[in-house]
Amino acid sequence: MGSSLHWRCAGALLLGAAAFYSQPLKANGFEDFADAELIDHIAGSVARGYGRMYGYGVDFKLIGKETPHQSPLLVQYNAPLKRCTFFISTRDKTWHSFEQYLEFFEGLPKQVVYEAFFAHESGHCVQMREQIDFGPVRRRHREELYADVFALSHVERYYPKHRKAFQEAQLKMRRAALGIQNEYDFYKELLRLHYSPGLQSALKVKNPQERAYSIAKAVDLL
């Protein structure tokens, strides 16, 4: 699988480097962000839920207020220790700058949207835990497609009535977003994937490990 430590950021839209310090995850660690308590609850339930489901540990660390950083959420997976660490920004400015992406999901409950973001990041850890390797060609893009579909799978499983609306919003976001799409038509590939028979079948698989590999197979067929 290559390196045992992999970094990802929320939605793969904003990348960067930062210095981190460790703290317990607390809602009041945020400056004054209205959704802090909701994010705190979701971080624990969704991230740890997938950790239990796939057999890896989960840690949370806060990105300090004094550390300028654009991404509100980063994830790192340590393969030897089988641990997934979520780094969460405590700066309101960071989360407010990310709200431009939340606008694509307007009309959906914030609970659903934030859970999907954490499911996306969990998808990166699941991929590493299950040793799913997309090979050297477009590996990074396939990994992001996989994480996007993992988020869609989460919505399909827990909020099926919102699946269609979330899927459409996800496509709109990817169509408008920059980032890694500069050299890759991410929207086009995601659109093909969303409506592929393989993905529709994968989203229905109940067994966690089988679903993880079914999603990977659908992504790898693109």
Image: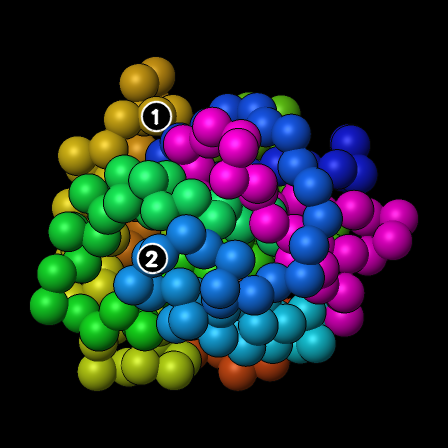
Image quadrant where one finds the N terminus? top right
User: Helix, strand or loop at disc 1?
Assistant: helix
| 22 vs 7: above or below | below
Instruction: Determine which residue is flagged by label 1.
Output: 179
Image side of residue 115 versus residue 59, left or right: left
| Kind of residue sitting beneath label 1 | Gly
Is residue 109 shown left or right of residue 94? left
Residues packed near mark 2 inside 10 Å, few (<14), some (14 to 19) or many (20 plus): some
Q: Horizontal and vertical percent for residue 45?
A: 54, 77
Q: Is residue 81 magenta?
A: yes
Q: Nearer the viewer, residue 51 or 129?
A: 51
Closest to the observer, 160 or 102: 102
Q: Tell me which segment is drawn in magenta.
A: 55-84
Residue lying furthest top: 183
In this view, the residue in front, 195 or 67, is 67
Direction left: furthest residue: 107
Name the residue at 18% across, 70% down. Answer: 108
In this rendering, position of residue 188 left or right of residue 79: left
Identify the residue at horizontal 67%, vertical 76% (top origin).
53
Give the amino acid at mark 2: Phe
Q: Quadrant of residue 72?
A: top left
Q: Position of residue 139 (x, y in %)?
A: 56, 31
Q: Nearer the viewer, residue 106 or 171?
A: 106
In this rendering, the answer to whether 68 lies above or below 5 is above
Say which mark, if any, is on residue 33. 2
Residue 12 appears anywhere in the view:
no
Mark 2 vs mark 1, foreground winner is 2
